[in-house]
Amino acid sequence: MQFRKSHNPNSLNTIFMYLQANPADPVPLLPNSVALLLVFCIVAICTFYVSKYLETLYAAKYKKPFFVHFYPIQKRLPADLQVLLQADSFYKRLHKKHQTYFEHRVACFLETTTFIGREGIVIDADKKMKISTMFVQLTFGMRHYLLTYVETIIIYPSTYYSKFTQTDNNGEFNPASKAIVLSWEHFVEGNSDAEDGINLGIHEITHAIHYGALRDNNVSAAIFYEAFLELEAYLASEEVRNQLVATNVLRAYAFTDKFEFIAVLVEVFMESPDTLKAEFPELHTYVMQMLNFNYFADKQS
């Protein structure tokens, strides 16, 4: 079929007048606000995945995330809890800027964590703060510091019978219940000697960090896990293992399994870092990487 061109100006005028009198339905367009929102969402998603990939490369090279602390609105503790915070030895070592970050994290931990007392023990501000500051201290170098598998802290007066392990325990981490369970007597005892390398609170919180690192998908978990794999390779040496046993830097319980090894190692790192660094600098470095503990140097700027 062929179409003939019309050169009749009258017919063109007729068509033009018809179109004016009967305008075609306009093609529906998205409102400007919706279109802008859609573009923004697409750009944001792309930016997120690109930055996540770049941070993965950065973390693999430098053993730390792009950033650790970013809080548009920083939380403050009530005055009575601030008094308790001022007494924390780790908090006092930090520069003022980092003290505000520390306080913010303690406040967030208290808001998101349930504390439960068993066998008549009373949960008071002192107990909450001592546990919270220890938790934040261990996770302070991690951007994702509120652990997926910790929602509840259960406190017993002393040794208790655990239905989870069916044994008498001083403490445990129960991932199924997302709970850390502590004997208050042994928690206090662990804090009483700052250099013996035995600290119940540090031990159980480390179990929770380790467990999360094996399952969570974030940069803090990835850094911990990669350092853990490097540590495992280092410990594959029989010579290193023999030296560890001979020096008694780590107590015998560390050699129960790899999870207890990490927990005991972090206890020693937190309480006797100089001894660990002098005897086994490699172990010291691996813990620094796992916890991003470089961030806590006394001379931070």
Image (cartoon, rainbow, N blue to C red):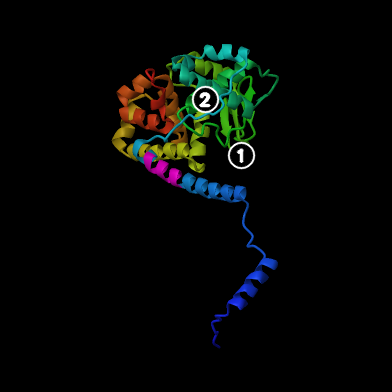
Residue 89 is covered by the magenta coloring: no
Majority secondary structure in the magenta region: helix
Q: Seen in the image, is 34 located left or right of residue 190? A: right
**Nearer to me, 8 or 65:** 8
41 up-or-down from 19: above or below: above
- Hey, which quadrant is residue 77 in on the image? top right
Q: Could you classify mark 2 by the number of other residues whose Cα lies within 10 Å: few (under 14), some (14-19), or many (20 or more)?
A: many
Residue 241 placed where, x, y %? 33, 33
Quarter of the picture containing the N terminus is: bottom right
261 up-or-down from 89: above or below: below
Instruction: Give the tally of numbered discs.
Output: 2
Q: Which residue is tagged 2?
A: 136
Quarter of the picture containing the C terminus is: top left
**Nearer to me, 278 or 163:** 278
The residue depicted at 35 percent of the width and 28 percent of the height is 284
Q: What is the three-letter code of the residue carrying label 2? A: Val
Residue 83's disc number: none
Q: Is residue 49 visible?
A: yes
Q: Which residue is tagged 1?
A: 176
**Nearer to me, 74 or 221:** 74
Label 2 secondary element: helix
Residue 281 placed where, x, y %? 31, 27
Q: What is the three-letter code of the residue carrying label 1? A: Ala
The residue depicted at 60 percent of the width and 15 percent of the height is 81
- Hey, which quadrant is residue 72 in on the image? top right
Highlighted range, magenta: 50-58
Residue 8 placed where, x, y %? 58, 80
**Nearer to me, 265 or 12:** 12
Q: Earlier in the sequence, mark 1 or mark 2?
A: 2
